[in-house]
Amino acid sequence: MDGSLGSDTTLPNKRKVMIMGAAGRDFHNFNTFFRDNPAYEVVAFTATQIPGIDDRRYPAEIAGYLYRDGIPIFPESALETLIAEYGVDEVFFSYSDVSHEKVMHEASRVLAAGATFSLLGPKDTMIESSVPVIAACATRTGAGKSQTTRAIARFLKSRGKTVVAVRHPMPYGDLVRQEVQRFATMDDLTAAECTIEEREEYEPHIAQGSIVYAGVDYEDILRQAEKEADVILWDGGNNDYPFFKPDVMVTVADPLRVGNELTYHPGETNLRMADVVVINKVDSATTEQVAELRRNIAGANPDAQIVEARSLVTVEGEPDLHGKRVLVVEDGPSLTHGEMGYGAGVVAARRRGATLVDPRPFAVGSLKEVFDRFPHMGALLPAMGYSPEQRTDLEATIAAVEADIVLIATPIDLRRVCLIDKPSARVFYELDVIGQPTLENILADRLDL
């Protein structure tokens, strides 16, 4: 393998470690537990889930005094070879939104190669804040965490609180430049050359008037965010559990994928840790699905307060879609490793009598690979944009599809970053809590607002 260890090997009895990740939890686990810990030597990271994040290094500038040359990052496919070549003693699994079965398959690979398989928990990786923290997490990607986060931010602002949102990491570029990122305007996103995936998470907060932090080093991020926040809102991505110790933890569960809350990692952890569980999409789910989800919540976390909500879907300008050929563009990560069969755009199109156009025969470049890798996706297009090249492929695919209108069901206005050569309209989806208790009542009581 190409890549030296680059660490200070003079300390005796160090345990050689490799971290399996996806440019998020892996870097956080390194920073909080391993970086200045002379008992361990992190010899490599492996990367998966996100295209183009392997074959680089965790840079020396932020790796600490034990790692003068940084740390190499390799594809996860090379796991067994790396364990043998570097004499790895222990492998730490450090990414999220995977089934329990997937975790154990990876564990089996590690064990068969002779190493120990481990997970780090909240006690070793959560950072304590000097200001209140509300964490919004989920049992699966695509459950509705982002709209729940926006609803929480609106409520806090209505009580006169300054909210700073801190987003789960998406450092897909220059890690040194991205060590601590602060976004207050749309121009900040452009200056940072944010990907579509980053914009989808940051832009809605900025549109609400919230400052957003993200990056690589979440100790530094937290300390800077504390200086300008009355409340820190942890916006958890990829259904990971929080990097900060929450005063209130809200977990969103999806009745359309009932059962996943008990069979995915670390979604089940989020369910069991939750103070509040929001059952979203009750307007799309059956009564039986909601009832089963309630039973699963009660079995795993009987002390959690349960809130029911619908995902209120509207279309920009309310165009007449009846009988129209519609290309639906949905949030990429929710469809890919989130494994959703459809999202709000498909819901909006079906409710309005549209005919969905299948983009798969028209897919260009990397989009072909995405459809091959995730065959569960049907007649919709995931808004993939992890690189400029992939964004170009997305534009070309949209241009090739024969459709009367494009429904943009991503959290951002895709027209800001992609050329769309057809009539288009955005699909919006917001949390609409029904019944009692409300999320606002619970937060006001728990935080004495």
Image (spheres, helix red, strand yellow):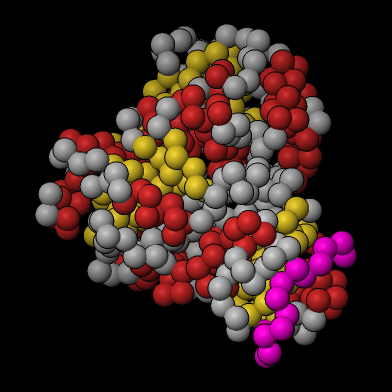
Query: Left or right: where does residue 184 sit relative to residue 410?
Result: left
Residue 199 falls left or right of residue 233: right
Report x, y in % for residue 14: 67, 85
Instruction: Tell whether position 24 is magenta.
Output: no
**Residue at image location 20% in from the left, 51% down from the top:** 443
Q: Is residue 164 visible?
A: yes
Front one among 233 and 155: 233
Name the residue located 52 percent from the left edge and 72 percent from the top edge. 33
Q: Note whether 219 is above or below 16 in the view shown.
A: above
| Residue positioned most to the bottom | 13
Q: Is residue 18 visible?
A: no
Residue 425: x %, y % from top left: 50, 15
Numbered label tally: 0
Q: Could you say which quadrant of the image residue 404 lies in?
A: top right
Q: In which quadrant of the rendered view does residue 79 lie?
A: bottom right
State the image coordinates of residue 380 (x, y, percent, origin top left).
63, 30
On screen, 125 above or below 190? below
8 inside magenta stretch: yes
Q: Quadrant of residue 78?
A: bottom right
Q: Which residues are magenta?
A: 1-15
Question: Quick check: 134 above or below 110?
Answer: above
Residue 34 percent coordinates (x, y) = 57, 73
Quadrant including the N terminus: bottom right
Q: Is residue 184 above or below residue 270?
A: above
- Residue displayed at 33% across by 30% down: 208
Between residues 39 and 127, which one lies in front from this camera angle? 39
- Mainly helix, strand or loop, the magenta region? loop
Image point (56%, 33%), residue name:
192
